[in-house]
Image (cartoon, rainbow, N blue to C red):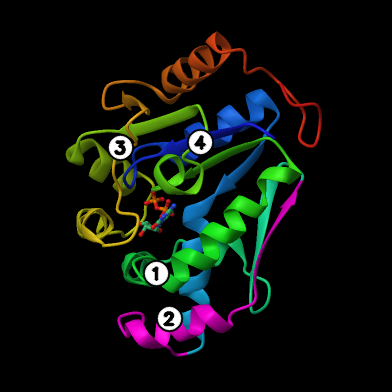
Amino acid sequence: MNPVVAIDGPSASGKSTVARRVAARLGFAYVDTGAMYRAVTWRLLHEGIDPAATEAVADFARRMDFRAIICGGATRLECNGPILPEDLRSPTVSSAVALVARVPEVRARLVEEQRSLRPLAPLVMEGRDIGSVVFPDTGHKFYLDASPEVREARRHLQGEQDAIGRRDDIDRSRTVAPLRIAQDAQVIDSSSLSIDEVVDAVIASLEKVGLRHSPPGGATP
Ligand code: CDP
């Protein structure tokens, strides 16, 4: 079975940058599961469905044709048609995504898709529930955190309009797969660390247990 490195944490904790760099260093495929929830949200909004209308969202999730395709170490998404990466981080999507992500039918379909990627390549997968729900059996779990002030400042610097406090509240309080620290996850507080320091800490911890560079689709350590 291919190894999975799970990187979870709240918004703007540095997960995406760290996960992408760790994947590049290891030669593993990088999978951003937040992008999957955003893709569903974008398509829903595009089809005129109210993201707060739980039953309509659940019905959409039961019918949607969702695909995550690993290509060149990254992942391309389709949800009733191609999804453009540049559409996913708009303020409209950011403010609606947590409402969509709390609907069990959405989660069930996306978790199924996430699990289906493991046989295809060694993975670095980032999200909110990767260590706790999607791959609870992986021995490589990290939880990145940073103070709310640092996270707000980072998002601001990225030039994104995003009420991360409100989104984190919804993510932490939902009934299915709430954001929480998996019992066996290594917690890294990145408030006063650079991205490189976090990446080095993750890589050092993985090397200690023998996880090293392996090209996507290649031999598994
Ligand atoms: O970039 P940022 O960390 O702010 O968010 P993201 O990773 O793009 O995730 C967007 C939203 O998707 C989160 O606020 C969650 O509501 C949802 N999500 C989730 O529920 N479970 C995941 N594994 C990943 C994201």
User: What residue is disc 2 on?
Assistant: 58
Q: CA distance from mark 2 to mark 1?
A: 7 Å
Assess disc 1: are there few (<14), some (14-19) or many (≥20) residues with their C-alpha within 10 Å of its C-alpha.
some
For marks 4 and 1, the one nearer the N-term is: 1
Is disc 2 placed on a helix, strand or loop?
helix
User: What residue is disc 4 on?
Assistant: 137
User: What residue is disc 1 on?
Assistant: 104
Give the residue type that dot 3 points to.
Answer: Ile
Image quadrant occupied by the C terminus: top right
Give the residue type that dot 2 points to.
Answer: Ala
9 sits to left or right of 201: left
Depicted 119 relative to depicted 140: above or below? below
For marks 2 and 1, the one nearer the N-term is: 2
| 61 within the magenta span | yes
Q: Quadrant of ligand 1?
A: bottom left
| 196 within the magenta span | no
